[in-house]
Image (tube, helix red, strand yellow):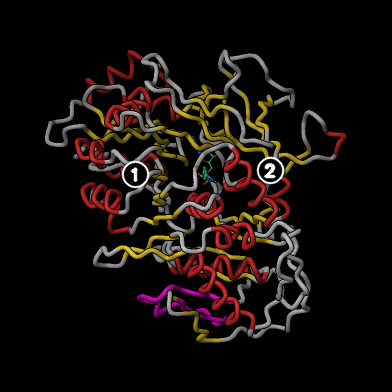
Amino acid sequence: MQRTGQGETVQGEEPTADNLYDYLLAPAARTPDKAAVVEADESGTLTDISYRQLAALAEQYTQTLELLGLEVGERIVVEAPSCAAAVALLLACSKLGLAFVPVSAQMPDNRLMTILTSLDAALYARAHGPGRPELPWAGGTARFALSGLSIDKAPARPTRRRRNVLALDTAYIIFTSGSSGRPKGVVMSHRAIVTFLRAVIADQLVSQCDRIASTSPLQFDFALFGIGLALGSGATLVPVPRTCLDSPRRMVTFLRKARVTQVHGVPSLWRPLLRHDAQLLKQLDQVRSVIFAGESFPLAELRRLQQMLPGTRLVNGYGATESMAASFTEVPDPLPAHQRTLSIGHAHRGAEMILVDSAGRAVTRPGVIAEIYLRSPALFSGYWNDPAATAQVLVPDPLQARHGHTVLRTGDLACLDERGELHFVGRADAQVQIRGHRVELGEVESVLAQHPAIASAAATLVPRGGEHVLMAGIVLKDITAPFDEPAALAHCARHLPAYMTPRRIRPLADLPLTENGKADRARLARLVTTAA
Ligand SMILES: Nc1ncnc2c1ncn2[C@@H]1O[C@H](COS(=O)(=O)NC(=O)C[C@H](N)c2ccccc2)[C@@H](O)[C@H]1O
């Protein structure tokens, strides 16, 4: 449907431009009464929001936002859990060409202020609930819920010049902490995200009968992936309330009650279940597939998960926010006993991952570690207001420089196996040099996790007397058992060269995690240092 510029649409015609609103609400025409999003309230009561109801809520939000006369490209910062109202606000922003910038209620005030200020956001909209009384934000503010969107303070903005929303316009911006620590805004256009979703849905990752449980906070694009996969395929999104994630029993009870068939989550989502209540996993007989992403799934834990979910397809979703993702690879069932690394396979339809060495040459021989470059039509537009950082990662295609293509330099290291599939090795910047040797922290962690008494492990470097020493934190399978550090160190010495053996190994109650549920090596370094 062609937009007249006033935001109206001429009914009947297929949308010409890629737009996330048109793409995600297409099922509303075919199956209006089908559940689009399952809402859980505090008491745990589940309510279905149909595609028709979601479209109506999005329309209601659109009308309220339209009165503000915001120009295409203005930024709306949205503080909410993954829920129907947040999805409706994402749709309303997409329809008006406003950039949806999700943040979580757990984000510290100063980081939120940094994001609001660097974006010069037009509006800071938060889902109903306890606010942030001390937030010194002088811009536009709003609150929203299933009942509607109310503007508390209108932004002072020049009126909209009324132009169409283009496929190149920004659909959303995700802030990642980035290894440098300074938050970078990953700007994704409508064309990038719709192209990506069309490709992965064409790769049969989901069927429209699926009920997809999403467990990541909205500020993590794994949550947006769940929204896109569910609605783009006409399936049903089931956001899992944070309160259900802290207890294995509550999580399993929720997944069963919501009749979930596909579960999305980072590897650490499964750790408490695997450690304390693995038997509960047998109750998830309706779960047909699990998609994990964000970091390598420790193989010992992955094997255990596979045993407890017989017949369930486990999919390794690899990629970066700068392209949403790159590949989805089914874990072989059973995972061969000798396998030490996980395959990240081949890129999704329409994209290609290539290995490039430090001299800019393609690596095609198996077993050679080199950097992954991603060729794809679904790449991000750039980092918000940071052309220098953008130029570091959106680089000329090293294998076809003259064509003018730009490719994504992922900063990830991988190597090819005999079948031409890529295996993830680690982050180039997590590669550490110890006494002149290159050390893969991931390799130290996987050796530690093979120790019979150790459930999971994380390694990091801590400054010590002018140099950096390798330290490790571990979680015991039996936290009541005394930890035999010399035995664990001897285990490492048997499997690793001396320079890769940790100086100390510290037992911890849990491995520290980032807000997105990944191993937090910076926090680990502080923990193991103080414990020393
Ligand atoms: N399956 C992996 N094995 C091993 N290292 C990994 C893996 N998935 C990421 N990573 C790492 O995480 C980095 C990207 O981090 S990120 O930008 O925060 N994005 C994510 O973690 C999630 C990603 N956008 C995504 C969203 C939705 C579906 C799949 C993937 C990658 O460059 C890898 O280093």
Magenta range is 123-144
Q: Is residue 155 visible?
A: yes
Quadrant location of the C terminus in the rendered image: top left
Identify the element where label 2 is drawn: helix
Residue 30 vs 506, above or below: the answer is below
Can you identify the residue that label 2 sits on?
393
Label annotation for residue 269: 1
Q: Position of residue 210 (x, y in %)?
A: 43, 46
Residue depicted at 58% across the width and 62% down the height: 29
Whether label 1 lies within 8 Å of ligand 1 gets the answer no
Secondary element at tag 1: helix
Residue 417 as seen in the image, left or right of residue 356: left
Name the spot of residue 372 as percent of width and height, x first.
63, 31
Q: Is residue 504 visible?
A: no
Q: Position of residue 225 (x, y in %)?
A: 52, 50
Of residues 196 and 202, the one nearer the viewer is: 202
- Name the mark nearer the viewer: 2 or 1: 1
Residue at 38% x, 39% y is 267
Quadrant (top left, top right, bottom left, bottom right) of the N terminus: bottom right
Nearer the N terminus, badge 2 or badge 1?
Answer: 1
Q: Is residue 136 magenta?
A: yes
Amino acid at circle 1: Leu
The crowd level at tag 2 (other Cα within 10 Å; few <14, some 14-19, many 20+) is: some
Contact? badges 2 and 1 (CB < 8 Å): no
Q: Residue at x 50, y 37 (%)?
A: 317
Q: How many angstroms separate mark 2 from mark 1 (CA)? A: 30 Å
